[in-house]
Amino acid sequence: MSTSTIRERLEEIRRQALEALSQSLEPAQVESVRVRVLGRNGELTELIRSLRSLPEHERPVVGQLANQLKRELEERIEALARELRRRRIEQSLAQPALDVTLPGMEFGRGRIHPLTQITGQILEIWTAMGFEVALTPDIEDDFHNFGALNFPPDHPAREMQDTFFLEGGRLLRTHTSNGQIRVMERRRPPLAVVCPGTCYRRDELSVRYSPMFSQLEGFMVDDFGKVTMAHLKGTLTEFLRAFFGPEADVRFRASFFPFTEPSAETDVRCIFCKGAGCRVCKQSGWIEILGCGMIHPNVLRAVGYDPQKHAGFAFGMGLERLALIRLGVEDMRLFFENDLRFLAQF
Ligand code: DAH
């Protein structure tokens, strides 16, 4: 650059800066002019930096001009900022005084979703009984959701209408039983673990079903002979009484699951009609709460355990269902619609 173009450029920076300052009404606008012109990469700063490349005899003259401009702008900016701040204070003092006796604004306070509250209570009961909590993946492969759990290849639960399949042979877990496999394949007995989590099935959202729901899986494994069906019954009865109250009546019915043998379903005497029969228990007097059983030898083999040496029990329960019963509501959709009139009641 020649000295005359530098002079022109300095003049232009000056003109533009003064013009921008004359239009500034707020301290923030003044500040942005300062940054644009005098900031670390500001127009003038860069220009001054570029003077280094001039031949030495030309430097002093333009250097002086540039520094003069810098000082001038700094002073003007400082003065204008001070003036604007002063005006602002004057304006606010001229306003009518603040009435501190006006009622305050009400802030809606957030609360924990009822399902999350109940899940927390359930985990507290299990951890108090010595169970660890493990989180296991929602996105699974066939082995962890089905194969290792002893589902035969043609089992109906594997079919399209139940399972959401993803690319690459992966799927969304249809139950939290994958948690058993995930934990056992990494660790050795003794184990007492619960795995809460979200599950997915191709169901329409309705009063009783949702395509996305929560379960809690639990299991206990130890040396063969140390964990029996009697422990299973005792442990689950203890849990259900902690959750529903010490008087809760519990019964076990024989059932079937591929991953347990023998298998059972566990009911609680209807807490609404005390067993007399009502709409909730469909006149049976009992409400089904969970599935359970002794872990099938094939499941133990699938995770590399020897079923001659180790044995265990497992159980799985639907958390929305437990929450519905506890809260005395009947419609599963209430948990997913986020209607504050419902949620604010808990
Ligand atoms: N996985 C079962 C379901 O999705 C629930 C279940 C039943 C889990 C029995 C268990 C069990 O561990 O032993 O409905």
Image: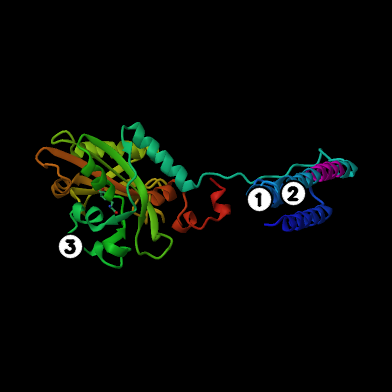
- Residue 127 rendering spot, x and y as whole percentages: 35, 34
The answer to which of 248 and 79 lies nearer the viewer is: 79
- Residue 337 rendering spot, x and y as whole percentages: 51, 58
Question: The disc labelled 2 sits on which kind of residue?
Answer: Val
Q: Are marks 3 and 1 in contact (CB under 8 Å)?
A: no
The answer to which of 19 and 238 lies nearer the viewer is: 19
- Magenta span includes 83: yes
How crowded pointer 2 is (Cα within 10 Å; few <14, some 14-19, many 20+) is rated as some
Q: Are marks 3 and 2 in contact (CB under 8 Å)?
A: no
Q: What are the residue bounds of the magenta stretch?
A: 74-88
Question: Dot 1 corresponds to which residue?
Answer: 54
Pick whichever of labels 3 and 1 is earlier in the sequence.
1
Q: Are marks 1 and 2 in contact (CB under 8 Å)?
A: yes
Q: CA distance from mark 3 to mark 1?
A: 82 Å
Label 3: state its secondary structure.
loop
- Residue 123 rendering spot, x and y as whole percentages: 38, 39
Pick whichever of labels 3 and 2 is earlier in the sequence.
2
The answer to which of 64 and 278 lies nearer the viewer is: 64
Classify residue 217 as left or right of residue 19.
Answer: left
Label 1: state its secondary structure.
loop
Classify residue 18 as left or right of residue 140.
Answer: right
Question: The disc labelled 3 sits on which kind of residue?
Answer: Pro
> Disc number at residue 62?
2
Q: CA distance from mark 1 to mark 2?
A: 10 Å
Question: Dot 3 corresponds to which residue?
Answer: 153
Q: CA distance from mark 3 to mark 2?
A: 86 Å
Q: Which image quadrant is residue 93 in? A: top right
